[in-house]
Image (cartoon, helix red, strand yellow):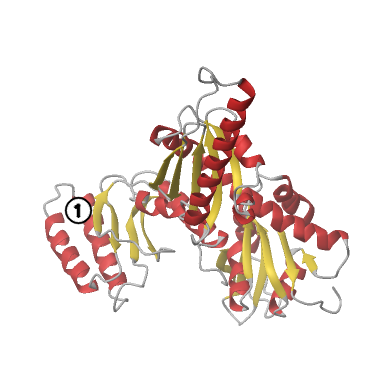
Amino acid sequence: MSSKKKTSLELFRLRKILSTLGKKEGRATELITIYVPPGKQISDAVTMLRTEYGTASNIKSTSTRKNVQEAIVKVQQRLKLFKAPPKNGLVIFCGAIPQNGAGSERMETYVLVPPEPISLYLYRCDSRFHTEHLQELLRDKENYGILLIDTSGATIATLSGKKLKIVRQLHSGVPGKTRAGGQSARRYERLRAMRLNEYFARVANHTNDIFLPMDNLKGLILAGPGPTKYDFDKGDYLNYMLKKKIIDTMDTAYVEEQGVKEVVEKAPEIMRKVRYIEEKEIMQKFLYEVGHDTGLITYGETEVRRALEAGSVRILLLSEALVTIRVTVSCGACDFKENKTLEKHKLHELEESLNGKQCANCNAQSLSITNTQDLIDTLADLAESSNTDVEVISSETEEGQMLKKAFGGIAAMLRFKIDGF
């Protein structure tokens, strides 16, 4: 991928696997979770598991003891495949998951390399997998600026993930609206307006100095009690680059630390809006190409797959709402293979239809499904092999719904035209 930040594809894949793992439950405390951070010796983790294996021999229930010890052995086997943890660390989930009531347990193992480094070294044996530490990685760690302002003062803060930092607090020095005795109302208002202008300029200078050099500043939230924030926004105070980054203007009851906390409480919804804006912009660029018939777009699985194989795709657009899988049907008697694309819920129907069906190549009744993969992953793998950016688009915007309904959830913007498109 061309971007160093977590891509929408990485976040989609992590969200999907964590959703799957979150639904897994053991019959008892039989599910193993282990987090191995980068820099930790694999041998240390294997030794720790050997100790846990011995401790598990004290479990009274025969079936629970057997399942826990088997899970520990499988985790040890997976760990030994690594000379050292990957640069972001390693997380393994393993345990006996009931498939259809008591006695139907099947040992399942999941190995994850996080999209960013983990610092946690953890072992847990529980009735569930501990995914909460990975859930934190779904939070966008890019920086957001917060500016609270009213006529009494201003507070400048940064928010990165869960980390909130108040960078600067300023007092305005602007007198109240009630004039001092002996001054004419007009002169007082003129002096007050001059002080207010100087104060706004001072706040803007500090804001520019703090936020302009900041890497990955995703947006600026302007807040405060009363109309002062709107007066500040209308004036030509902030650098034009920062003005473009104002993503929301909100009311708060306070302008100091308590006001910052009010903003943070509302910030997750604002940040989600930022991704929606990004998605809308991506889709609007795609729709522009469609409307102007530039020949630099294509859509539908067959055409997009062809473009990916030709290396002509610049950006692959996939709807998060796709519930389609790519299935490989193989013959056990010859080398015949066939790929099919179908909705997930039709997989069982396909399996039944293969019973007794003859192979098109050798006529043997030996057809079976040998591989299944989500279509999103299939196309994303093709894209990554040709250095193509992948955008997984939600269906929560009008444009996202259009991608799913009008274009089948699969579309591409091209680097160059291809004959026949």
- For the point 58% across and 26% down, the residue is 188
Q: Left or right: where does residue 262 sit relative to residue 179?
A: left
Residue 317 vs 367, above or below: the answer is: above
Which secondary structure lies at badge 1? helix
- For the point 61% across and 82% down, the residue is 335
Do we see residue 144 in this rendering?
A: no
- For the point 59% across and 78% down, the residue is 385
Q: Which residue of the protein is positioned furthest toward the top in this rendering?
A: 181
The residue to which callout 1 is attached is 65
Residue 342 vs 104, above or below: the answer is: below
Q: Amino acid at mark 1?
A: Arg
Q: Which residue of the protein is positioned furthest toward the front in this rendering?
A: 182
The picture places residue 401, in percent across and down from the top left corner, at 72, 47
Residue 83 or residue 220, whichever sits in front: 220
Residue 232 or residue 215, whichever sits in front: 232
Q: Which of the 4 quarters of the picture holds residue 12?
A: bottom right
For disc 1, the neighbor class at 10 Å (few under 14, some 14 to 19, many from 20) is some
The picture places residue 178, in percent across and down from the top left corner, at 53, 19
Q: Quadrant of the C terminus?
A: bottom right
